[in-house]
Amino acid sequence: MHNTKNILTVNGERSTANGERIAKNCLLPTKNCLLKTACCLLFTACCLLLPSGCHYFASPITDEKIAEVNGKVLFKSGIDMIFPSGLSPEDSLHILQTYVSNWARKQLVAEIAEQYLNKEQKNVSEELEDYRMSLLIYRYEKMYMEQRLDTIVGDREIEAFYNASDKNFLLPKPVAQVIFIKVSEDIPQVKEIEKVYRSSTPENREALDRICSTIAEKYTNFNEQWVDAETLASELPLSAGQIENEWENGYIQATAGGYAYFVHLYRTAAAGDRAPLDYERENISNIIRNKRKQELLKNLENSIYNDALNHNKLKLYINN
């Protein structure tokens, strides 16, 4: 590994690179200047890797310099975490180049901001404290919920919520439960499939299973989930609009590309209808979990607030 000390300095006394300096009498650096400086940083960083190849990423990290901008130094120890395991040397080099370039640009722009903002504009202590407070609260609440939030929502609770919200959960588009069949149009069983796929009788459904389970390119009921026209359009040689035109018929047939398609829409719900419970089950589960979360956080805040009042940690100087 080559000696990497004092690799690159931008706008400093010890600069060994030939990058263009930033003029201090201009409001903003030229684009050319920033690009040349960033290129110098990248070139220097890449030179660190070339002599040792992929061994750089496997060797222990030492505090050698990767890049420097006016005294602000990027060390190897600060970039170890940016490399996922199992990367090729080429991918690792690309990640390093991107990281160093972004780091350099940020330092250069921040330096210009420091020069041209006044003292009041540069005072961000209040914003930093607000952000710090919000981040601490978020992390604590996240930990608190992970320890206490019940995420299991039972079927009875889901059904009760659904039944109590009879004016909600209206469908924005038609949905259906279907049987979908895709077979080669040249097989002799096509006519037999056409006869039985529209029927829901146990005998015909059994015959359909017997035929399609062995010869069909695809034979599914989508795990009895409710699907929309867009989902079927991804499987059929038809647009979503063409499929919706056949929705009320309950059956769709098509041929294209050497295949025959059969769809039986054995249960349907129109746009504007109340959505079936199974269609909204996961959505309702999420709503219930979110309500539990909000209630848990509200109770936490109230508990902390009341505890502060009771133990004289909080004093209010407001006349009622």
Image (tube, rainbow, N blue to C red):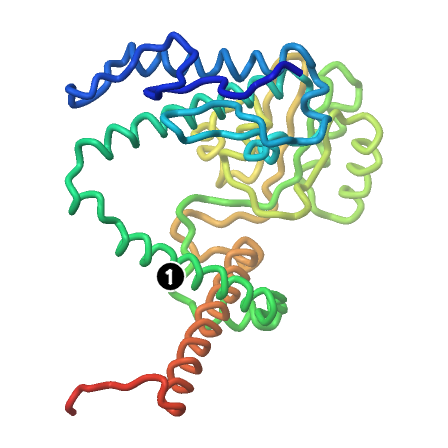
| Residue 82 falls left or right of residue 163 | right
- Residue at (49%, 50%) from the top-left corner? 269
Residue type at numbered disc 1: Met
- Helix, strand, or loop for circle 1? helix
- Residue at (22%, 43%) from the top-left corner? 122
**In which image quadrant can residue 5 be found?**
top right
Q: Residues within 10 Å of mark 1 (few under 14, many from 20)?
A: few
- Residue at (59%, 72%) from the top-left corner? 148
Q: Label 1: which residue?
A: 133
Picture layout, residue 226 above or below residue 77: below
Q: Position of residue 312 (x, y in %)?
A: 35, 90
Quadrant placement of the N terminus:
top right
- Residue at (39%, 85%) from the top-left corner? 308
| Residue 271 falls left or right of residue 118 | right
**In which image quadrant can residue 188 be found?**
top right
Of residues 314 and 195, the one drawn nearer to the viewer in this rendering: 314
